[in-house]
Image (tube, rainbow, N blue to C red):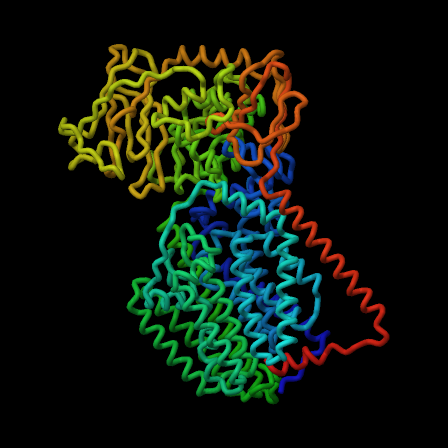
Amino acid sequence: MHRPTPPGDSRVTGRSAALLAAAITVTALCAADALARCYPFGPRTRSVNDLGNQYVPFHAHLWDLLHGRADGGLFINWQSGYGASFLPDIGTYLGSPFALLVAVFPRDEIDLAVYVVTVLKTAAAGAAMACLLLALRPGRWWAAGLLGASYALCGWGVAVAIYNPMWIDGLIALPLLCLVGEWTLRRRRPVLGVLIVALAWIANFYTAYMATLAAGLVLLLRLLLAGLPRRQALAAAGRAAGTVALGMGLAAPLVAVVYLGTKHASPAREGHFVPVPTDDLLARLLPTTYSFGSPALYVGVTALLLALALPFHRAVPRRVRAGWTLLVIAVTLSLQWAPTQLAWHAFATPQGSAYREAFVLCAVLVIAAWHTLSHGPPDWRALGAASALLALIAAVASRSALVHRYTWAVFLLAVVGALGGLALLASQGQGQGQGLGRPAAGRRRTVLAGCAVALLFGGQLGETAATSAVASRQRLAHMDDYAPWGERQQRQADAIAGADDWPRYRTEPGRDQTVSNDPLMVGGQGVQYYSSLTSDVLSSTLTAVGGGWTSRGRSLQSLDNPVTDAVFSVGARVHSPPDPHQSWLPQGGGPVTVSRAQVPPLVTVRPPGTSAHTGVAAFGPSPYRNQERLLGSRVYTLPRATVRTGAGRPPQRGDARRPGLLVAAPARADLPGPTITARCTAGDRVFLWAPHFSGTARLAGGGPVARFRSDAEGAKIAAMQPLGAVPAAGRLRIELSPDRPGRVPDRGAVGCLDTAALRTAVEGLRATAATAVTVDDGTLRAELPAGSKGTAVVAAPRIAGWRCAAGGAEEKPAGEYYGLIAVPLDGSATSLSCTFHPPGLRLGAAAGGAALLILILLCVLGAVRRRRAAAPTTTTEQPERLTHAL
């Protein structure tokens, strides 16, 4: 029977194991990036997909916020989406304490800052797992460090979470929450347990939810294996539930805001879960396999072998073997069954990767491996059985297309290292049931033990570095990628800084974006905004006026249009050459320029009779007419347009599901493409609205080339684009060059803007608009001309949480004017004030306050009970019993 480790030694052992796990993790990640020649160790960027589009820009905005340079504060981000709720984004992307470390880096090294934060968070996950393993059962510290690193460097970590850094907080939370479960079993550290739960849910509530479910399963198994009387088991479960409830209560001010933010967000696509084939599932257990749509289950060959050996390791108590083996099987099956998949994802179908809970199975595999190793190295019988199972897994996985030739080379070397190391340990006869690694006499045994450790550590470092490097290269081959901060972004930032005069007017970073959150990266106050919490009212409003987007409406693009610029008070617009990092764009340099326009201020006054309750649903089908509704004046001519194929024939029509006229690229490059012809007043500016067209368009005879991007799945739609001026003859011909089959509207595709009428409309709005506007985080104030009647319209989306008042009246929920903030005026008010309170903040604050009060009362009661105790009571009986039983 294992003797408990003395408390002092236990702390030293845990610290050593945590440091070792962190060191292995950092070394492997940096070696992998050097091997893949990725930033910061090579020329290849690591900013793929959401890492470049979301996480780096949001951390850049956090840097600006911490240094007092951001437009907005904790409540409102005035730089994105013409005014977006920022607290939900903090809870989603920036809740981790590690995020604050970006403040110590220079602003132009924000990519390096995010990389360092990512590596440190992954190392913290390994350290936390190493501590958990030693808390579950004593053993050699270096073995706990090795398996802790196996968890941190699991396939989910290096293939999925590495470019979604907010998810790494779940990787850290899972072992910490399991530690909290251990403390509740032993009646230890109740306050610290509550604080850890709260921190986990604040850091990232999405993965914290999964980690909490996993920790609950681990605690349930521990209770079953302990064989405690029912009353004691129920009491322990009750303490754990109370700890989680109080911790979630403390996190409620942020979690409630995020939760309600998702309710107001642009709706995501409804998907259906389809489990991956068994051969693909098993292939992801092997090193160097990669796939976006399958669960990344790799934990290293050593950990996998030990987990497979558990059922056959006779030194492990039978109940422990059966319990952990069944938990591994149950979690594996839950990944492949739709109802449990939904349960893991909080009953919402995930967008993108369907296996975001895969880190739970990785954790369970590593804990199972620890239960094998901590009872002594598996003997030859157990190692032989595990090797046979591993060979069977490899044989089935070999049928998967995810396995490549280099997979087998890395796999075989890892198997040699793992089997060699474990076999050497087993040959030492190091005490079955006495914990791994009681000192063995003799120099020969010491040398062999050292060789065993070297094989285990060397094999793990090699296979993990290779796996991570392959994942980095595969992501670059299959996902959009973005360059780190460089000369282009610096020139954009300098141009914006020179033109910026917020809140007098907005400065738009421009259509030619570098990333989807350009305003957060380079400054300004644009409509560009990409978040899981992009509001539905903003997305719907922008779509109605001809805006474009990707990610099914959650990634909004700038709309280069003078009418919408006037509506949203965009007085300066940056024009940049195409990003040279994007190979699909035409290459060519050019200066960054700024165009300016006289626009109304942020607050305008519309005449009496204008409804303050005209919502987004009141928009019509034409984006040109919808722009005029927002402007309040007629400025467009919508000519009758004729669409013809390259052969001069009318194009086919789409169906009810995909309406419009079908256009496609000609069969040969030397053949003419489709065209659109129409007649307008000479000198008017021509715009083309073709949201489901992909390719380029230009006016015959010259003019700018406009690029349109859309896809057949509906994840992207193209924005309305300017094409130049109507020729003197009044007849215009638009030449289309599709890059894939697409559609153009059968009516209303072409709009001709009367610039003189627009100037008149703008002058009218400026004449009656607010004379002064001030903005401070979630507060907006405006001075109005005396006698203002009608409706005051604020050029910001009417997202949930705005309350406004005219004059000294009491604030009420703001009205809505075609998706914008609106306040009725009766002629008596000379001022306007609006304040923003994130939905859920009051409710969350009340829950957080109640949880804090309960926690304080429990602490006081506990202190009183201890003081009143006549004599000290021993509390070692139950922990001793747990240690022996488990």
**Residue 739 visible here:** no
Is 582 positioned to the left or the right of 872 in the image? Answer: left
Is 111 placed above or below 600 here? Answer: below
Above or below — where is 865 with respect to 484? below
Q: Quadrant of residue 827?
A: top right
Quarter holding the C terminus?
bottom right
Tell me where residue 28 appears, x and y as whole percent: 50, 62
Depth check: give the residue in front, 80 or 823: 823
- For the residue pair 136 and 10, the one nearer the viewer reads as 136
Percent of width and height locating residue 219: 58, 70
- Whole-percent x and y of residue 688? 31, 25
Residue 849 place in picture, x, y as percent: 70, 50
Residue at point 50% right, 59% down?
Answer: 29
Quadrant the N terminus occupies: bottom right
Horizontally, is 258 left or right of 630 in the view? right
Against 358, is 378 above or below? below
- Please state if 538 lies on the left or on the right of 810 as rendered: left
Q: How many marks?
A: 0
| Front residue (pair 392, 554) | 554
User: Looking at the image, is 617 positioned above or below residue 225?
Assistant: above
- Could you tell me if residue 736 is visible in this image? yes
Seen at 53% across and 63% down, the residue is: 213
Q: Residue at x 60, y 89 (%)?
A: 442
Q: Nearer the viewer, residue 183 or 279?
A: 183
Is 736 placed left or right of 552 in the picture?
A: left
